[in-house]
Image: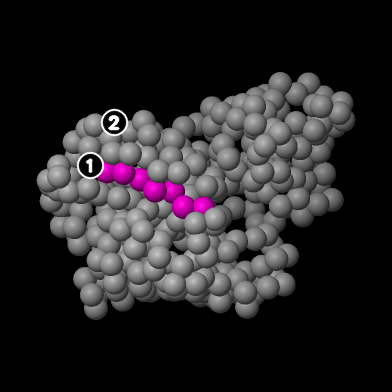
Amino acid sequence: PSLPPSPLLNSQTRSGFRVLIPMSSPVTVLVTGGSGLVGSALQSFVSADPSRPPNESWVFLSSADGDLRVRSAVDSIFERHKPTMVIHLAAKVGGLFANMKEKVEFYRENIMINDNVMECCRVNKVEKLVSYLSTCIFPDKTTYPIDETMLHAGPPHPSNEGYAYAKRMVDTMNRAYNAEYGCNFTSIIPTNIYGPSDNFSVENGHVIPGLIHKCYIAKRDGTPFTVWGSGRPLRQFMYSGDLAELTVWVMRSYDSPEPIIISVDEEDEVSIKDVALAVVKAMKFEGEVVFDDSKSDGQFKKTASNKKLRGLKPGHEFIGIEEGIQRAVDWFVENYETCRK
């Protein structure tokens, strides 16, 4: 899907320098992986964004638009849409066991995808490329809170090293393209995201969507709502709408090849137990809640620092966890038959 230009005025960025683009110059923002959790949130945000420039249109790609592992397919996409800016969300992703079993494929396919997108951005003189990284690519053994300077300070966890090293190379190549060609390439490192259009699979989904689906089933079937683990671990959860808004801000206003962590504040870390109880409240579930501590808790905390973000954008107010979970639950219930689960 694509969004036509909006009726309001703003400025854009050219190779690191802020300039006003004449109204007659169309700006096309191309989003790879545009049909998932973050892509859907971006569509919702930009369609209602009051600061969206009048000459800016958006194109959201899905896997049906071409195989990003194949250079000729990516060349065709760039030729067809002629993007001014690119937000690169697409990646080969999977759960713990897939990452452990297919390290070669997670490395090679992500390297191919990222290399094709980055080189096509250079060749086609794209003015800005914003790629997504992940906190799971940070060193396995580290101190907390993690920040942007620590990304390459040690090996990642062995379980996902194929994916992690491929993603780390995006950060390396952002700086290389900037130094050699003057490209305005950067990356975002988000913490745990949740919201509408997520994958709500109980087996393969992330924490919040998995709990939402589990609670829905417990309410429907009149069974206990069982949460794996003690509920004690802490996480920074961010509503997808916040990430969408801040991604657009990065695209328009953040001009450095160095990555930026997008996260709620450290003091907004919440326990898995608090999240589960917020799901219970939002779902209006009145049955028994069981924490099965025979299941592993995983890492106790993975705190990330958003000090860089707060220094550049101190006034952003994140959607609270209870409100965000209520929105996600409402969307899931409304779209139960057709959503990913």
The quarter of the picture where the N terminus appears is: top left
SS of the residue under disc 2: loop
Q: In this view, does 332 lie above or below 18?
A: above
Could you say which is closer to the camera, residue 323 or residue 341?
A: 341
Mark seen at residue 117: none
Q: Is residue 278 left or right of residue 54?
A: right
Q: Mark 2 points at which residue?
A: 50
Disc 2 packing (10 Å; few <14; some 14–19; many ≥20): few
Residue found 81% across the figure and 31% down from its top: 218
Residue 56, quarter of picture: top left
What type is the residue that disc 2 sits on?
A: Pro
- Res 94 quadrant in image: bottom right
N-terminal label among 2 and 1: 2
The crowding category of the residue bearing disc 1, from other C-alpha atoms within 10 Å (few below 14, some 14 to 19, many at least 20), is many
What residue is disc 1 on?
55
Mark 2 or 1, which is nearer the eye? Answer: 1
The kind of secondary structure the magenta stretch mainly shows is strand
Would you say residue 58 sits in the magenta stretch?
A: yes
What x and y, as percent, mark residue 320?
50, 31
Q: Determine whether, in the image, residue 53 is placed left or right of residue 189.
A: left
What's the residue type where badge 1 is placed?
Answer: Asn
Q: Is residue 101 above or below residue 5?
A: below
Q: Which of 271 and 100 is in front in this view?
A: 100
The answer to whether residue 329 shows anywhere in this view is no
Above or below: residue 225 compared with residue 27: above
> What residue range appears in magenta?
55-62
Q: Measuring 13% from the left and 51% from the top, which residue is drawn there?
A: 19
In this view, 93 is above or below 200: below
> Magenta includes 237?
no
Secondary structure under tag 1 reads loop
Residue 64 placement (x, y as % from top left)? 54, 55
Q: Position of residue 66 (x, y in %)?
A: 50, 61
